[in-house]
Image (cartoon, rainbow, N blue to C red):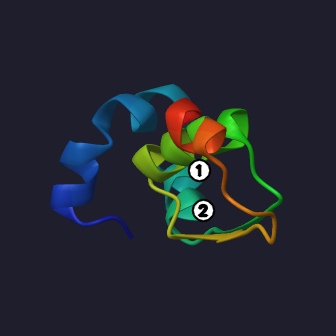
């Protein structure tokens, strides 16, 4: 069950896909592997949508280009 605070916070999303779907989002755990600038944007949007937990794994080295893009 969503709390009153969560219902207020996610009101527009609940109107779009319903309280059951929002509850499932709240219980979702994601693992992102080998991320890039697009996947980071998707990650941000999923976080704002209410996904419970997002783990990011990327074993590539960070370059100055990566910092500028993100």
Horizontal and vertical percent for residue 19?
A: 46, 49
Q: Is residue 42 visible?
A: no
Return the residue nearer the eye: 28 or 1.
28
Can you identify the residue that label 2 sits on?
24
Residue depicted at x 34% and y 64%: 2
Q: Is residue 36 left or right of residue 47?
A: right
Seen in the image, is 29 located left or right of residue 61?
left
Is 41 left or right of 14, judged from the image as shown? right
Q: Residue at x 35, y 28 (%)?
A: 12
Q: Is residue 21 above or below residue 37?
A: below
Task: Give yes or no for contact between labels 1 and 2 (Cβ–Cβ under 8 Å).
Answer: yes
User: Which disc number belongs to residue 55?
Assistant: none
x and y percentages locating residue 27 in the rendered image: 56, 72
How far apart marks 1 and 2 lie (CA) works out to 5 Å
**Residue farthest along the front direction in this orientation:** 64
Q: Dot 2 lies on which element?
A: helix
Residue located 52% across and 33% down the image: 68
Q: Quadrant of the N terminus?
A: bottom left
- Which residue is denoted by mark 1 in the rendering? 21
In the image shown, does 41 or 45 lie closer to the viewer? 41
2 shown above or below 38: below
Locate residue 36: give its quadrant: top right
| Quarter of the rendering containing residue 41 | top right
**Could you say where residue 57 lies in the image, as x and y percent from the top left?**
74, 71
């Amino acid at each position: 069950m969503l709390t009153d605070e969560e219902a207020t916070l996610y009101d527009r999303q609940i109107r779009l896909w319903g309280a059951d779907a929002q509850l499932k989002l709240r219980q979702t755990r994601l693992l992102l592997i080998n991320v890039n600038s697009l996947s980071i944007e998707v990650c941000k949007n999923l976080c704002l949508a209410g996904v419970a937990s997002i783990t990011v794994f990327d074993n590539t080295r960070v370059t100055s280009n990566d910092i500028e893009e993100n």
